[in-house]
Image: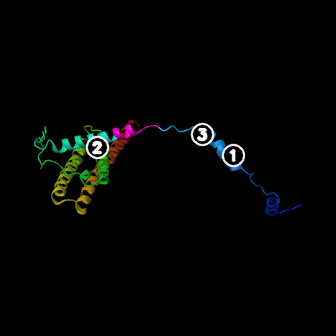
Amino acid sequence: MEQDLREMFNKEKLEQQFTINNGHEERFLEKLQQSLPEHKKTNRAWMKVAASIAVILSVGVGYFLLNGNSNIENTVVDSDPINENQTEFTFGDLSPDLKKVENYYVANINLELAKLEVSPDTKDLIDGFMEQLNNLNLEYKTLNAELKELGPNDQTITALIENLQLRLQLLQKLKRKLNELKLSKNEQINENSI
């Protein structure tokens, strides 16, 4: 009873030869024509004329606006004059990727600063770290001015990024010191109470 399926299909294909009846294609096309709606020819010449007029008018108005008012002087009003020496050259002026790096570090630095809990016991420690942070911030401004004067170069960009990293590391170190100080105070309180 075992038969090869391929042989069985080939055999059946040879036995049955299908042919299309005479006139089948003509009957199909006739039915297709009857079922399709007739297309009405509409006069769209007026649409072409209207489109042409709109294009001509827009080109004319554009030409008039650009060239017709050449005797009028444009005056720029600046409500907040900025001194050229005061503006900082940022990473965003160089590249969007560098701007993302700067924003990342600045956001993390600000976050760490916001988390600091100042108490009379930790004030001296925090003031010491803040002085170091201020020195790094002044160095960052100096590097930024150098970047503006000399233009972008690898050493200055690397130094700016390292400065941001150092500030973040300094704040994280301060946070660890504050946690250690807090833990040691808690241990002293626990030992004294026992």
Give the image's coloring scheme. Answer: rainbow
In this image, 40 relative to 141: left or right?
right
Name the N-terminal-most of marks 3 and 1.
Answer: 1
Crowding at mark 2 (Cα within 10 Å: few <14, some 14-19, many 20+): few
| Quadrant in which the C terminus is drawn | top left
| Residue drawn 19% across the image and 59% down it | 151
Kind of residue sitting beneath label 3: Leu
Say which mark, if any, is on residue 110. 2
Judging by the rendered image, the residue that carries numbered circle 3 is 36
Magenta-drawn segment: 42-50
Residue type, mark 1 in image: Arg
- Residue type of the residue flagged with mark 2: Asn
Residue at image coords 30%, 52%: 96
> Circle 1 sits on which residue?
27
Q: Give the SS element for disc 2.
A: helix
Q: Is residue 16 something one can see in this rendering? A: yes
Q: Is residue 43 magenta?
A: yes
